Amino acid sequence: MRIPRTLTAFTRFPLNLGFSSSTHFFSSKRSQGPFHIGASYKMEAPGDGVTSAMQGPNGRENTQVSCVWTSPEGGQKIDIGKHIFCNRAVNMKNIVAVGFDMDYTLAQYKPETFESLAYNGTVKKLVLNLGYPNELLDWSFDWTYMVRGLVLDKKRGNILKMDRHKYVKVAYHGFRLLSKDEKVATYGNTLVRDAFDEPDYALIDTLFSLAEAYLFAQLVDFKDNNPGKISEEKDYFRMYRDVRAAVDLCHRDGTLKQMVAHDPKRYINEDKSIVPMLQMLRTSGLAVFLVTNSLWDYTNVVMNFLCGPQKLDARSTLTLDWLQHFDVVITGSAKPKFFHDENRANLFAVDIESGMLINTDNGSPMAQVGGPSLELPDEMPDKAYKVFQGGNVGHLHKLLSIESSSQVLYVGDHIYGDILRSKKVLGWRTMLVVPELEKEVKLLWHLRDTRKKLILLRSERDQIEDQIHHLKWSLQRECLDTAEGEKVSAKLDLLEAQCDRVRITHQETLKVFHEKFHKVWGQLMRTGYQNSRFAHQVERFACLYTSQVGNLGLYSPAKYYRPSEDFMPHEFDVISL
């Protein structure tokens, strides 16, 4: 377990906010250089003292622009929700290139519009292409219901939240809460522990997956409550496969991206901190690159909206001004395969005016057979070909003259697609963007007294149980006379009643505490007193994590991010904290 170190004078936070054993808060220290299945609800606004301008499960706020570190106003106290948290040391002085994913990293999509658009498109594909009942067209999407880190049991139609040891703590069948006995009977009475991985389970680790998880739960409820409406051949597993197929159809026909391109402001959050952050990184001498699975046409639209000189609408003309903030842009990267050097995907240069692809030899343009010859010396300036498609990480390293993988910091939102592969396979330094974290951290600060109460209640329960066990031992093992036996029994009854009261109070307080974060699933990073499966993944694979990509601009580009000290349980009674 990791406990935060002593904090600087101008930063005031609780010592342990209880969401990840690797949590640490950094101060900004200057360095050199109509048919609706399921109970729908809206998240409660936080209580007094907590910002309540939340937009949804991604935790994004309509906040004013924070000052970049290099500005005269920079280097001051950083809002608690915008801190960068450290699991593994990252010395920015050793970093030579910083890379970014685009979708859900630089571009944060609005769940109430974009996820609803994806949901509605998927439902239409299920009905029109895959033969599902027309009733589905009347369904609606509650974008606040699902959270990241859940696991879908495809065979049983269950949605699970697990702790870091892969024990199921919360389980729903569709939208019906499973009892403790049902959970134990299904997931706790086996001789061999389930790995909870594909192909029988689906991991909900991206914000884009929330809509398909919600739709799967709706289909499970619909099938259970309407026998015969869905073919008997379509069991829960097949229904999930159909949902995935419908999602893929929405991507392939281009409907989603065409809608976003027509009106980016409707679907993407504006973030004025991105450009100053990119400018600061490049001015400090770092190379900056973009690696995205989106193709050039869509990438150009989104990046124009985020970094361009004007706000886009259907009548706006796209410019290429945003490219000045990047040294290399790789589109159509097919992550996570991109991170394998043995991946033999060809690297093409993109003609940014026409969108046409040009053959390359490790990034250098090649003449086409039968076509006009290329004047190579005139065609190879960096500015001419900085946009590419495909390839692999080896191509990227050559384009940026990277000598060691540890010199790269990559920022993404996807545990598996961005963070795990780049960290585990390459050894890149990684930063995970977790938009939900901003709200979670602020609530943890606001509810710190409740958490202290929970700790005291748990300790009190342990002490009472120890006394009960001792008295029971006395009754069973010691030869007590009648009077002494009655006296011990009476005391035992009182303690057991007291223990029940403390237990009930603790359970009710813990339930209310978790519901402050989410009515159904509780804290994102916690399940009861254990780190959640999602928090465990963040701790394992993300060197750094934060709520917004622009938070990187609030810190010195030469900062040494240091993790807090690790502690194991046996050390708490020995080391004075």
Image (cartoon, rainbow, N blue to C red):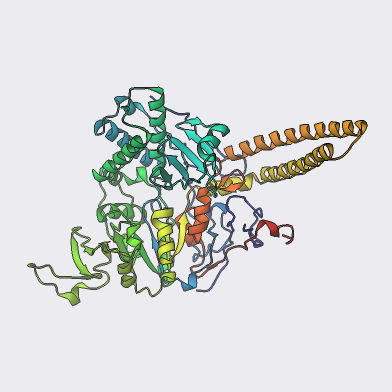
Image spot of residue 380 (x, y percent)? 22, 73
Image spot of residue 138 (x, y percent)? 34, 26
Image spot of residue 318 (x, y percent)? 26, 54
On screen, 134 above or below 260? Answer: above
Q: Quadrant of the N terminus?
A: bottom right
For the view shown, which residue lies furthest in the bottom direction? 377
On screen, 324 above or below 239? Answer: below
On screen, 60 above or below 217? Answer: below
Q: How many marks?
A: 0
The image quadrant of residue 457 is top right
Q: Quadrant of the C terminus?
A: bottom right
* Residue nearest the observer in this picture, 405 or 309: 405
The image quadrant of residue 387 is bottom left
The image quadrant of residue 320 is bottom left
* Residue nearest the observer in this picture, 17 or 427: 427
* Residue nearest the observer in this picture, 295 or 343: 343
Q: Give the residue displayed 35% in from the left and 62% down from the top.
A: 339
Q: Give the residue displayed 35% in from the left and 32% down from the top.
A: 235
Locate residue 458 relative to residue 343 in the image: left or right. right
Q: Give the residue displayed 91% in from the left and 31% down from the top.
A: 482
Residue 413 visible in the displayed image:
no
Locate residue 375 relative to residue 280 in the image: left or right. left
Locate residue 258 relative to residue 174 in the image: left or right. left
* Residue nearest the observer in this picture, 408 or 352: 408
Residue 526 visible in the displayed image:
yes
Image spot of residue 428 (x, y percent)? 43, 66
